[in-house]
Image: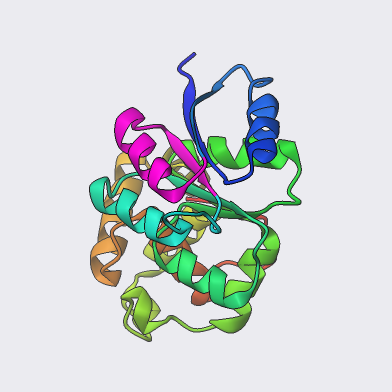
């Protein structure tokens, strides 16, 4: 079994120790580094290239948002899962706009955190249901700042829209193919067309688009591709 490597970034030692203890009980998860500052998080992400970086937003020396920017600038494919006590709208908006793979609130259960890490590691995105509802509530229509033209849902075929919906609900290509009775290769082709038409080239962006466009319900537990 290939292990999922994780870097934990939180300025509170007791929080990091608690998270490490929780994750160490999972056979497929391995904490390879701990960062007490945003700067350390950037350095550890570059050094270890972990599968997932679990990042708090409030970090000293270099704040979490800037650390996220720098990590993604160095490695656009990096998978960052935010775990924060902050759920205010401004913070959520700024963080999700950076292209993180997920956002959890700190009162999240240990089981949900492990699930989120696995989903993110598998190329999906994962938002706490409350965060997903908040995103949808304040942006029921596609947003220009997401890089998506308003009304662009209309440019998708019915099949492409269905593929986008299933991907946004967290289904991997193989499962989408089974549900639609098509090949995984055809699913990948539709996915490529959707990305080209919407000018979105990452799964997190597709997810935010699907939420904003109302393609998926805001109360869906978002294990999202």
Q: How many numbered marks appear?
A: 0
**Residue at 33 percent of width and 55 percent of height:** 202
217 in relation to 106, above or below: below
**Would residue 217 be visible to someone looking at this image?**
no
- Residue 28 forms part of the magenta stretch: no
Which residue sits at x=27%, y=45%? 75
Coordinates of residue 148 in the picture (x, y in percent): 33, 77
Question: On the picture, is 70 further left or further right than 173?
Answer: left
Q: Is residue 65 left or right of residue 69?
A: right
Instruction: Using the rendered view, name the quadrant where residue 218 is placed.
Output: bottom right
| Outermost residue to the top | 1
Question: Where is residue 124 shown, x and y percent of the image?
Answer: 48, 46
Q: Is residue 96 visible?
A: yes
- Examine the rendered structure and indicate whether residue 1 appears above or below residue 74: above
When asked about the image quadrant of residue 131, the answer is bottom right
Q: How is the image coloured?
A: rainbow
The magenta-colored residue range is 36-55
- Identity of the residue drawn at 32% across and 82% down: 149
Residue 167 spot, x, y in % from top left:
47, 53
Front-most of residues 3 and 70: 70
Residue 89's place in the image compared with 193, above or below, is below
Q: Nearer the viewer, residue 176 or 148?
A: 148
The front one of 29 and 165 is: 29
Q: Is residue 54 magenta?
A: yes
Left or right: 61 with respect to 56? left
Q: Tell me residue 108's x, y (percent).
A: 73, 48
Instruction: Determine the residue positioned at 31% across, 63% down.
Output: 194
């Amino acid at each position: 079994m290939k292990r999922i490597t994780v870097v934990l970034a939180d300025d509170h030692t007791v929080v990091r120790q608690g998270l490490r203890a929780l994750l160490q009980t999972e056979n497929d998860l391995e904490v390879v580094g701990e960062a007490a500052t945003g700067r350390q998080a950037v350095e550890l992400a570059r050094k270890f290239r972990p599968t997932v970086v679990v990042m708090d937003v409030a970090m000293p020396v270099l704040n979490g948002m800037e650390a996220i920017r720098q990590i993604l600038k160095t490695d656009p494919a990096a998978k960052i899962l935010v775990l924060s006590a902050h759920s205010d709208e401004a913070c959520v908006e700024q963080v999700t706009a950076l292209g993180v793979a997920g956002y959890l609130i700190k009162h999240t259960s240990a089981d949900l955190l492990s699930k989120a890490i696995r989903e993110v590691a598998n190329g999906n995105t994962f938002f706490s249901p409350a965060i997903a509802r908040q995103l949808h509530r304040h942006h029921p229509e596609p947003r220009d700042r997401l890089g998506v033209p308003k009304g662009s849902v209309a440019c998708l075929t019915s099949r492409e829209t269905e593929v986008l919906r299933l991907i946004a609900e967290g289904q991997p290509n193989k499962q989408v193919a089974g549900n639609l009775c098509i090949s995984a290769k055809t699913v990948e082709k539709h996915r490529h067309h959707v990305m080209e038409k919407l000018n979105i080239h990452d799964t997190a962006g597709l997810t935010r688009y699907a939420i904003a466009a109302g393609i998926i319900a805001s109360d869906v537990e978002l294990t999202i591709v």
